[in-house]
Image (spheres, rainbow, N blue to C red):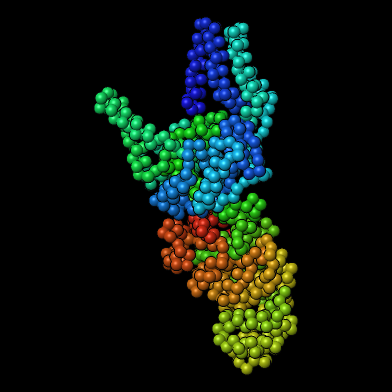
Amino acid sequence: MNFNTRVKLLALASVITIISSFVTRYALIVLAVIILAFREDVAILALSIRHPVQPQLVIRDNYVYDPVNKLVHSFMLIEPLHDLLRLGEDKFTNLIDEMLLRLNLCDRCYVTFMVTGGRKIARVSMIDEPPFSGFRDFQANVVKVLGDYFMVRMLKGDELKTIINQLQYPVSSLITVLTPPLILVPLFGALGVIPWITYAAVVVWYYISGGVMVNGGLQFMRISTRNGLMTSKVTQTDVYLLAKAFHNSVSEYALVISGNSVLSSLATREYHKASESLVVKERGKSYPGLLYWRNVIDRLTSGELPLRILLLSNSNVDHMGTVKSRIASYALWAPGEFLLSGLSHDAAVFIPLTGGRLSLANDGRVIRIGQDSLGKPVEVDLDSLPAGHMLLVGPTGMGKSWAARSILAKLIKMGIGVVVIDPHGEYLNLGLPIVDVSERFVNFTSPPNIHNVKDVTLRIAQSISESFGIEDLDMLLSDLGGVIGHGDFRLVFSNAAKRTLSIELSYIYDLISSELGRRGFIKQEELLSGIILSFRSILPNPELTAFAMSQVMAYLYSMFAGRRARLSNVLVVDEAYYVMGSGLMELYVRGLRKSGLGVMLITQTLTNVSATLIQNIPLVLVMGGPDSYILELMSHLRLNQSEVEWLRLGLAPHMMGSRSRALLIEGPIRRQVLVELDPSLKPISD
């Protein structure tokens, strides 16, 4: 008999007994007997009046033990590797079926998925006793299986204690819950003392024995009382749509899943019983039961797994009959008596495959990118990325630069130094100092931390070759080899213009020496603290623009290469198509991994960009746009049909309330996201 049934019997018996007491007061003795018979239920219900309660737990470093219910638990943070919105109907249900099958759930085993406080948590539980050998085997399998569908990080130590947060039940609250039944004394006289003393003794005994604590951590207000999905034959489309609707409306919940070894035989037995009743006895009354069990058998035959499920939430979920209950939080820790029969597609509705923080680090620097279409936050932890690089690609007018500014403003607020190569003056409202590169520029012929003049010469020669289309690399090396390493790049190129035998190269050298840094150099300290490099004055010359961009990158590369440091600076290259086709770009991106410097490349196109370069950028944000643009991206980024459809529906930000449709890619994880654009950073040109 489960808890809900016992409570109903307790309530019914108590009401009948109290009514009978108005006829004969000796019926109150029966009430005392009822309280004793249901003593544990009475104690839990009474103590739950003032506070959400839970069993007293023994907390170890990496697990929790409930000695009363013989349950051992372990916890882990999870973030999904798959997204409900990308999977589609059939892939979603098939993925859940596969995962639940591999979990190998038994009747004594439980897996709980929780979404609370913006975190996704999985709990592994089993009825077991020390030394917990059965639990450890079950836990090892669950962690292995979940690792194929989620990022997983076990919780232990202080993190685990924070999650549990059990508190001592206050004596003042105990006195409060003991007081109301005293009404029996003035109503019934001396005999009214008997049930009150029995009630008080039961509650106080449970309190003193330490059977209950105040739940200061994982709290829920509603508990499921029925599984409405069991009454109908749900299709994959039904499950998918129910899942989207649920995750769109419910932000905090817990789903407990356990094995159900008796459902198959029970369904067969009850179906035959209803069938016999339909034929022999009461036709109308037996028909609903016949349909119900026929549906269960058909779903089991189609491959669904028999389960027991419990849903706890802070919002109403109609088809699970969730009702407000003071013992909902207690049920989380002692779920066995609250579980309802269910099937794997019933559970699939609640598995948290939405939203996502692309990290599980507890001390990382997190930036919010936006929301998925269900309203769940999509965040990125900078410190969890293998490198601090990002690619932002999108057509004109779809919010690409606006999204970049919104992200950069958050980075600046975190204390990260930002250097922006700004060709069009779109980043002037970030609050950083602005320098026109024609007035001041980096002294790229004398980069820091590089003492091999030949390397510097070769790199500059390659940049000139790629930017200006000069094929004779040997002549470039000859012209520059004798003068690089002697300080001021303006003098270096002025001298090279006089030495060269090529009229074309003489013009290029003069152009570099006369159009960049006329009034001096940018200091390293300015780059580290953050600066906007305005390229508007040289933008009419695309070759010089490409060369200048590459020299800024090379200079910053020389400042950071070889370091091992947490991300502290970001170089932003807008209109990055000028340099993304360069072979040197791959060198810079690979060489700056975990150096403390990240590179954000912003571009309209990926034409002529190598697959190797894209593979070395761990974070990609793809803005929505027209079909021609999306078709170009399909092969570069291997977009599937649902991703294409999502991006095709993208509109200009002003038509979407300062948001833009985009696809966020971080390794194998892909999120369809509505990027949140900061209205204060929208320039007139957007």
Residue found farthest to the left? 279
User: Which of the pair 34/632 is nearer the observer?
Assistant: 34
Q: Position of residue 57 (x, y in %)?
A: 63, 35
**Residue 204 in which image quadrant:** top right
Determine whether, in the image, residue 138 is placed left or right of residue 565: left
Classify 231 as above or below 529: above
Residue 409 visible in the shown view:
no
User: Which of the pair 338/1 is nearer the observer?
Assistant: 1
Classify 492 as above or below 161: below
Q: State the residue at coordinates (69%, 24%).
A: 172
Q: State the residue at coordinates (33%, 40%).
A: 298
Classify 94 as above or below 382: above
Q: State the residue at coordinates (57%, 41%).
A: 133
**Residue 291 in which image quadrant:** top left
Residue 499 visible in the shown view:
yes
Quarter of the image with the C terminus in it: bottom right
Q: State the residue at coordinates (66%, 43%).
A: 61
User: Which of the pair 180/504 is nearer the observer?
Assistant: 180
Q: Position of residue 483 (x, y in %)?
A: 71, 87
Q: Position of residue 610 (x, y in %)?
A: 51, 72
Classify 125 as above or below 507: above
